[in-house]
Image (cartoon, rainbow, N blue to C red):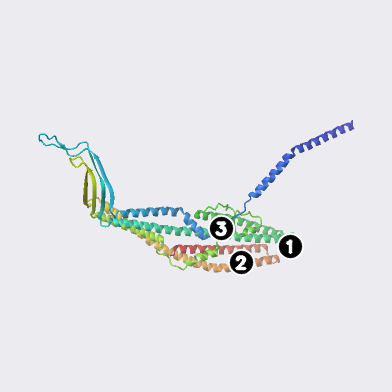
Amino acid sequence: MEKIERREKGKGKRKKEKGKFKSLICNFPLVIFLLFFLTFCLNAALLNAKEPQIMSISMTDAVENAIKNSPKLKSLGMELEASKYAADSQRSLLYPRFFIDGTFRYVTEVPSLEIPIPGFSGKKLGDNINYSIGPAVIWTLWDKSSTRKNWLGALEQKKSKENEIKAVKKQITLATRIAYFQVQLALEQVRMIGDYLKLSQAQYKDINLSYEAGAKSKIDEMMANQEVLAKRKLLRQARADLASALRDLLALTGEEKGIDISLPFYSGGQNDLPDGIEPPTAIINMDSIDDSIKTIKKHADSEPDMQHPAIASLENSAKSFALVSEGLKSGLWPKIQLSAKSSIDYPNGPDLSSFNQNSVNLSAAFPLFESGKTKNAAKEQSYRASAIEMRIDQSENDLTRDWDKAMDQLKGLLSQQEINSQYVKQAEDLAGIVYKSYTAGRSTFLEVQTANIQALDAKTQSLRTDIQILIQLAQLENMSK
């Protein structure tokens, strides 16, 4: 009986194995399909992996694009066109005006002439329909130069708008350059921290090998690892700061590059990335700081422009208000106009027919009483001119003060940079000496960390001083001739 049961169990197992085998054979096409699908998805992901795009931005191009795409400048351009048409409109009043003059009138009652003569039934002295049409000319012979002064005032407003555009261009240039300098600062910080991260990683590898060999302590190994993590954190924040500075610059230039700049990196660094950092989405190529300094340093020794476009714009506005005020005062004098007309009129009195009529008219108007309207309007414009003249004085004082402040700051920064260059060199040399001393067992790793931090801090201070020099130079150029 036991043998029979074992045989039956064996047959059952063989049937189950055959069933599993048949099931596997039946599902084999599905397995192949899944493997093919996974392979396809993997290949697609690899193909869709984007290489970092290169973004090259020069300071000159950035300024040109900012000026070209500025909504404020476009708006001022429209206002300038409006001021040109306003001046042309005022000038046209200096010349005779030709036009077609026409009138039409319908009356219900027409007077008639009644004479008590036998056989005379009366005569209408006109018609219900009356009209007159023909060319006419009118010319202001004398208005004490009121029209001319209004035209000259409109011309000054046009000049004021032209100088305002120049002043805004200078402002946009300064703002764009400062934004560009901030990108340069952030980019150099990414480069600098990236170099120090690679240095920390190299030191950590040496210390880790020494630790595994029993030559270094676990404390040194952990401190070296913490140094790497700290530098990685600094680099990630520096890249975020660079992305933020780039977005500010692109917002000013109005140029959408269509490039993902969320994880930027400096040009050349993509070929030697530190271990463990995220791959860059964009490679940023900028002018060097030294080239930027050379570009605008020539303006540092020039003089402030006391005819700066912002001041010139105010002067034009003051002249405009003064001229308009004088033009309004002229309205208190007589105004003499000459007019002439040649027309076809209907009716010709009692004769119901059209006829040609030529006329010349000379008129003079002298204001006797208007409740001070003209005088008050003239005073308003005069006070506006005086108010702008006060602003001109303040603007000139501000320009002189800002120029002197920028020059003082520049001299101080140039002196600091001479000290920084020595400080950076000594800090780098000291960091190298301390690490060699550490590998020889004469210094602690804490001293290595301190020396590395000092070297990084020295370079950061030098970099920030360079950017401050650039900003002061840009401000001086903005105020120069």
Task: Name the element at disc 1.
Answer: loop
- Residue kind at label 2, given as amino acid type: Ala
At which x and y percent is residue 324?
A: 31, 56
Instruction: Residue 21: name its quadrant.
Output: top right
Q: Which one is closest to the eye, mark 1 or mark 2?
A: 2
Residue 269 placement, left or right of 114: right
At which x and y percent is residue 169?
A: 45, 58
Q: Residue furthest top?
A: 1
Judge by depth and name the residue closer to the eye, 423 or 65.
65
Q: Where is mark 2, residue-wise?
A: 427
- Residue kind at label 3, given as amino acid type: Ser
Which sits earlier in the primary sequence, circle 3 or circle 1? 3
Which sits earlier in the primary sequence, circle 3 or circle 2? 3
Bin the neighbour count of mark 3 within 10 Å (Cα to Cα): few under 14, some 14-19, many 20 and up.
Answer: few
Work out how far the residue at label 1 is from the one at label 2, CA to CA, in angstroms: 27 Å
Instruction: Residue 31: name its quadrant.
Output: top right
Q: Which one is closest to the eye, mark 3 or mark 2?
A: 3
- Residue kind at label 1, given as amino acid type: Ala
Task: Name the element at disc 2.
Answer: helix
Q: Quick check: marks 1 and 2 in contact, CB under 8 Å?
A: no
| Residue 378 to residue 420: above or below | above
Q: Where is mark 3, residue-wise?
A: 56
Judge by depth and name the residue closer to the eye, 28 or 229.
28
Instruction: Residue 187: name its quadrant.
Output: bottom right
Kindly tell me whether residue 395 is visible in this rendering: yes
